[in-house]
């Protein structure tokens, strides 16, 4: 006789809420104290859960920072943005949409992006998470580069086009324009113009 397994929807929802609470607590502590100074016990206390719950729900600090990085690069807005880019046939519109979407996603995940890049030299786990976040980010930009090349809109190949997109729409670019005190809209408009100047004939 095969034993049936049953997963309670209420229990599953509770597990997701606990998981999310742990990630939010960790994110806030990483920002406040830095990755090295934050403890799993502190995360548990901030999330309002038992210490063992942190380990069973997410894991230790390396697993937590990795989960936060994945959360940012799997933002539900990414696929929607790529779909919008895919149907756009005017090159400048493609670049405008790229600026708009990368800015929106960077804004939503600004805290963890700051943690990853400010603490990358402090711990190998953070460095690995940052590297994976960059890899996934650039993979998304590669899709846009392929689309631009397919439109015959640029005078470079896919590799160079992706590199230019990363230069103007990567996390460092957004951090720079925001550091100037520019609004997200001002930053998007300027970065779009610069990318267009670099890529379009």
Image (cartoon, helix red, strand yellow):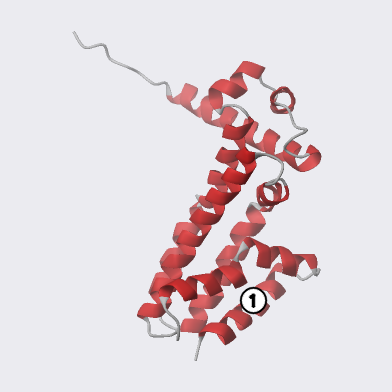
In the image shown, does 84 or 164 lie closer to the viewer? 164
In the image shown, does 121 or 109 lie closer to the viewer? 121
Q: Secondary structure at mark 1?
A: helix
- For mark 1, does the 10 Å Cα neighbourhood hold few (<14), some (14 to 19), or many (20 or more) residues? many
Residue 63 in sight from this viewpoint: yes
Residue name at image x 39 percent, y 79 percent: 149
| Residue reaching furthest to the left | 1
Residue 85 rendering spot, x and y as whole percentages: 44, 71
**Which residue is disc 1 drawn over?**
191
Disc tally is 1
Residue 10 horizontal side relative to residue 113, left or right: left
Residue 74 horizontal side relative to residue 129, left or right: left
Residue 115 rendering spot, x and y as whole percentages: 70, 46
In the image shown, does 125 or 61 lie closer to the viewer? 125
Residue 104 rendering spot, x and y as whole percentages: 61, 61
| Residue reaching furthest to the top | 1
Residue name at image x 69 percent, y 25 percent: 40
Q: Quadrant of the N terminus?
A: top left
Residue name at image x 46 percent, y 60 percent: 139
Residue 12 rendering spot, x and y as whole percentages: 47, 26
Residue name at image x 53 percent, y 49 percent: 132
Residue 157 horizontal side relative to residue 177, left or right: left
The correct choice, above or below, for 199 with respect to 63 in the image is below
The correct choice, above or below, for 75 with respect to 159 in the image is above
Residue 88 in sight from this viewpoint: no
């Amino acid at each position: 006789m095969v034993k049936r397994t049953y997963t309670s929807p209420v229990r599953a929802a509770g597990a997701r809420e606990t998981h999310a609470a742990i990630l939010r607590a960790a994110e806030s502590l990483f920002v406040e104290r830095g990755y090295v100074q934050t403890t799993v016990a502190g995360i548990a206390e901030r999330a309002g859960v038992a210490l063992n719950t942190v380990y069973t729900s997410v894991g230790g600090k390396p697993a937590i920072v990795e989960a936060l990085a994945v959360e940012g690069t799997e933002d539900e807005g990414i696929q929607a943005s790529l779909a919008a880019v895919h149907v756009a046939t005017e090159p400048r519109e493609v670049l405008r949409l790229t600026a708009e979407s990368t800015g929106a996603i960077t804004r939503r995940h600004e805290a963890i992006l700051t943690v990853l890049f400010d603490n990358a030299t402090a711990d190998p786990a953070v460095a690995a998470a940052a590297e994976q976040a960059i890899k996934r980010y650039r993979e998304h930009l590669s899709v846009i580069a392929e689309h631009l090349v397919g439109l015959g809109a640029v005078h470079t190949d896919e590799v160079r086009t992706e590199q230019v997109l990363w230069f103007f729409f990567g996390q460092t670019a957004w951090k720079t324009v925001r550091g100037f005190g520019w609004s997200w809209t001002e930053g998007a408009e300027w970065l779009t113009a610069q990318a267009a100047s670099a890529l379009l004939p």
